[in-house]
Every structure is written in structure tokens, then in C-alpha cells.
């Protein structure tokens, strides 16, 4: 081979500080963790949070995974994206090696079961939920969710909390909530589910008394007219309760909350999307 051509070929093929494995067969058993992501049973298990692994999709979310405390199990990436993400992969690979699979987009589409445009997937080991008592002691803000089954809303809430929840925010989950590690929730959160600690409240709504006993004032966000204008609150340790889109918080949760608060809005506007309302409330809440 001509030496100039050989040199040019070497120059056009970047060398990465970790090995890559090319996948050309959609049925390759090494792709099992990424296969059939539209499968109904798989989605049900993801929703319930009953799997010990999770899938991160999109460049931003995979970057967050690589920067997080979670163990990375594998990455499947389009060759065209590898050079861009390699600087984030290298330090994690050196600390705890994992396979990096290069997969052409057409093969990736056959593996996952839909037209996948985001260029990169990663699988991670799901960490244990946070300890409720530690969160009640150490968090600087708390958001409590009841019945948020919509994965887009859950992801948006986590993204908002990461931005507006102060230095050490946390989330407590009541019944009926989509698991934050559900694939779309994780993606919509831009990966912030990986950094905002959360735990489940097993005895709802009586656990709100546990929150109160730890020194928090529980605020139920509601559009009802007799709720207190959120601007009128004095500085305290507030735990903000958000209910499902449409029905809002249940009567039991409203009854257990210390106070009902509302965001003042123009007459004739019924309410805001739950993630938007939560973001506005978090920005307005006075904190100690």
C-alpha cells in the first residue's frame, strides 16, 4: 500500500483511549440490554421501578450518567458521535471499564424497535433510593409528588428542582408516581434524575406527619380561591406538594398538609401544567 495513503487513513481514524466493539447484527446477544425498548412489559416494569438497570438515551443524558455516581454497564453509540462523547467516556472507563459498542443507525433501529435518532444509548446500574430520614435532615428543599403518572411531567419536575430547588434539593414520591428512572422521565429531566435524590413514602398520606415532625412545613399547591397567596409566606423549611395533572392533590393529601397555597393568576385561567406550576412555586418560595 502507498505510504501516503496509509498515513492519510491513519489520520482520518481517531484513536480512542478505550477499546470499541463494532456491532453489525441486530440479534447480537450483547445488545440484549438495549433490545425491544418499546416492549409493553418492559415499559411496565420501567414505570414501576422494578428493574435493577435503566436506559439513558440522548447525548445530554448519557453525559449526565457518565458524570454521576451510577455504575455504567454499557454504551451503544453511532460511530459519528463517538469522537464527541469520547472525552466523557474515557475517565469513567479508566475507573470502571465497560463495553463501548459502535452501532450504525440502521442496526440500532432494528435493535431498539423504533426509529432512533439520538445517536447514543447507555445502560446503568440503578442505585438504591435515598433514605427518607437522611433527606428530611439534610435537604435544603423538598418536593413531594402524588399521583404523577405522566413521565414527561416527572422528568420536567426533576429538571426544575435541579435548577430551582437550592443547594441540596430532594424529592419524596407518594403513590401512583411514574418511576423517575423510567427512560423518558430520565431523558426529559436531561439526566438530573441522576443527581437529585429521591425516596418513596410508604405510608401515604400519614407520612406527611413524619415530614412535619422533622421540622418541615408542608404546602399543598392548589388553585382553589381560599388558598394563601404564595407571596405571603414567611421564610421556613417548606416541603411543596404537587398533585397529578388534572385532578391535583387528593382530599387526603390536602387535609394532611399544613397549608394550602396558590399562585395568583389572571381571572379565567384555571391552572398551570404541574411542572410549570411547581417551577413557579419553587422560584417564589421564601427559604430560611
Image (cartoon, rainbow, N blue to C red):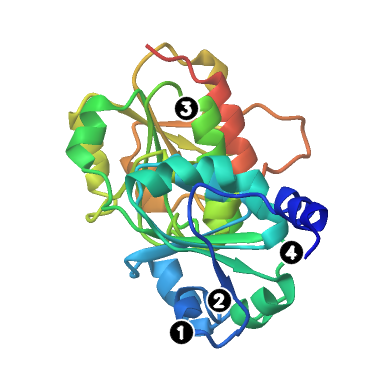
Q: Position of residue 148 (x, y in %)?
A: 49, 56
Check disc 4: other Cα within 10 Å, few if <14, some if 14-19, many if 20+. Answer: few
The relative height of residue 226 versus residue 166 in the rendered view (above or below) is below
C-alpha distance separating marks 1 and 3: 42 Å
Q: Position of residue 113 (x, y in %)?
A: 64, 81
Residue on which the image places disc 4: 117
The tag on residue 29 is 1
Left or right of residue 121, residue 255 in this image = left
The relative height of residue 217 versus residue 21 in the rendered view (above or below) is above
Residue on which the image places disc 3: 165
Left or right of residue 252, residue 99 in this image = right
**Sooner in the amino-acid sequence: mark 1 or mark 3:** 1
Front in this rendered view, residue 242 or 15: 15
**Sooner in the amino-acid sequence: mark 2 or mark 1:** 1
The relative height of residue 163 versus residue 120 in the rendered view (above or below) is above
C-alpha distance separating marks 4 and 1: 22 Å
C-alpha distance separating marks 4 and 3: 32 Å
Amino acid at each position: 500500500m502507498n505510504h501516503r495513503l496509509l498515513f492519510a487513513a491513519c489520520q482520518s481514524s481517531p484513536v480512542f483511549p478505550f477499546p470499541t466493539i463494532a456491532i453489525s447484527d441486530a440479534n447480537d446477544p450483547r445488545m440484549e440490554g438495549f433490545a425491544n425498548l418499546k416492549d409493553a412489559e418492559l415499559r411496565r416494569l420501567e414505570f414501576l421501578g422494578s428493574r435493577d438497570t435503566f436506559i439513558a438515551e440522548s447525548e445530554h443524558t448519557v453525559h449526565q450518567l457518565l458524570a454521576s455516581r451510577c455504575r455504567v454497564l454499557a454504551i451503544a453509540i453511532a460511530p459519528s458521535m463517538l469522537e464527541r462523547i469520547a472525552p466523557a467516556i474515557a475517565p469513567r472507563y479508566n475507573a470502571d471499564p465497560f463495553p463501548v459498542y459502535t452501532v450504525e443507525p440502521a442496526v440500532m433501529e432494528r435493535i431498539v424497535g423504533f426509529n432512533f435518532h439520538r445517536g447514543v444509548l447507555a445502560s446503568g446500574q440503578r442505585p438504591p433510593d435515598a433514605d427518607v430520614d437522611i433527606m428530611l435532615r439534610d435537604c435544603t428543599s423538598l418536593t413531594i409528588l402524588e399521583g404523577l403518572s405522566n413521565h414527561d411531567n416527572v422528568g420536567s419536575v426533576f429538571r426544575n428542582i435541579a435548577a430551582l430547588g437550592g443547594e441540596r434539593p430532594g424529592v419524596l414520591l407518594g403513590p401512583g408516581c411514574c418511576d423517575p428512572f423510567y427512560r423518558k422521565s430520565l431523558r426529559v429531566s436531561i439526566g438530573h434524575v441522576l443527581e437529585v435524590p429521591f425516596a418513596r413514602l410508604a405510608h401515604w398520606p400519614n407520612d406527611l406527619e413524619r415530614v412535619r415532625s422533622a421540622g418541615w412545613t408542608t404546602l399543598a399547591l392548589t388553585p382553589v380561591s381560599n388558598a394563601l397567596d404564595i407571596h405571603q409566606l414567611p421564610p421556613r423549611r417548606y416541603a411543596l406538594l404537587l398533585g397529578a395533572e388534572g385532578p391535583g392533590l387528593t382530599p387526603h393529601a390536602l387535609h394532611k398538609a399544613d397549608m394550602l397555597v396558590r399562585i395568583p393568576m389572571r381571572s379565567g385561567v384555571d391552572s398551570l401544567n404541574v411542572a410549570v406550576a411547581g417551577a413557579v412555586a419553587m422560584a417564589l418560595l421564601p427559604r430560611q
